[in-house]
Image (cartoon, rainbow, N blue to C red):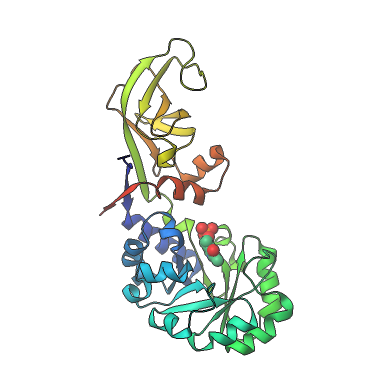
Amino acid sequence: MARPLSVVIDRHRIRENLRAIRATTRIDLIAVVKADAYGFGAGEIVEAVSDLVEGFYVFTLDEAIDAHIGERSGKPVLALAFDESIDAKVYLRHHVRPIVWNPRQAARLRDARPVLSVDTGMQRLACPARDIDAALRAGAIDEAFTHATRIDQVDRLIELVGRRGLKLHAAGTALLDDPRARLDAVRPGLAMYRGAARLATPLVETRAGIGPAGYTGFHADHHGIILAGYFNGLRPGPCRVNGRASRIIEVGMQSAFVELTPQDQPGDEVVLLDDTLTESEIAREWHCSPQEVLVHLVGSSNRLYSP
Ligand SMILES: *Cc1c(COP(=O)(O)O)cnc(C)c1O
């Protein structure tokens, strides 16, 4: 069987990250634990942080039910109400408040205290301006939010649903540092998980390069092999070997080539992600978002928790 790598997850670091977010924002925290907590394990993360937050956010109701998020934490869980056949009672039973984006959903799920998703530009799973009043009335709604990555989207939320006594939130990680985006709560995802995963694997082979190597015929004076490949979510990009910045030159299904110096030996550790080689640094070279790096690397690994 193909072997996943082991990633070590530092729950204490995640708690520290949340405490730091609280210290700067001084408002309610809704911890985003969708996609199995970005690969960190939704059940374990909810267990580890529920005393520090006011609620949780997931994408689907199933995610909340499978990880027992409401039951474990006793805190409200927000989940998008995709399946129209599911009754308000199911949401209530699992401490889930359905997120709705049209008057029909709002009316159907009124008893489960729905939350309105407001379209401020994303044009996805959110209520357009013309339907807002009807949706608020139909669901007796007291909380609304938008998915904002820019401050003008926050301004638009306030323009559309401000000054009505609703609890409002907009900011994920991208807007945490902007006081105008904080409103009544923030929804950090990435900012919770930063620096909290360590992924490393030993060199199994090292050698001096003789002419073109690998699938792509690359040239390196010295290179080594690790047993991690795209099966493990890895891509060509930065890594660290013996405390030094190095590179993953080429990635195969379950192995990869690493650029080395003559001093590096089999058994030496190659760091693929930790608090000195961050998901943001990797994301720049992979040309993707830091969230995507976490889901790839942490999400395809076997999780170990410390402490
Ligand atoms: C994923 C998500 C977040 C968190 O985003 P980050 O950028 O990872 O902090 C916040 N709100 C909503 C609605 C989301 O879907």
Q: Is there any visible trace of residue 173 in the rendered image? A: no
Percent position (x, y) of residue 256?
41, 29
In the depicted structure, whether residue 204 falls above or below residue 192: above
**Front-most of 43 and 53?**
43
Q: How many marks?
A: 0
Q: Quadrant of residue 154?
A: bottom right
Query: Dividing the image into 4 quarters, which one contains the C terminus?
Result: bottom left
Percent position (x, y) of residue 230?
44, 38
Residue drawn at (74%, 79%) of the image: 130
Percent position (x, y) of residue 53?
41, 71
Position of 248 with respect to 135 (left or right) is: left
**Front-most of 25 and 13?**
13
**Front-most of 70 and 103?**
103
Q: Quadrant of residue 71?
A: bottom left
In the depicted structure, whether residue 50 falls above or below residue 35: below
Residue furthest to the top: 210
Query: Dividing the image into 4 quarters, which one contains the N terminus?
Result: top left
Q: Is there any visible trace of residue 295 in the rendered image? A: yes
Residue furthest to the right: 130
Position of 192 with respect to 103 (left or right) is: left
Position of 139 with respect to 306 (left or right) is: right
Residue drawn at (43%, 63%) of the image: 33
Residue drawn at (38%, 71%) of the image: 65
**Front-most of 286 and 171?**
286
Percent position (x, y) of residue 249?
48, 26
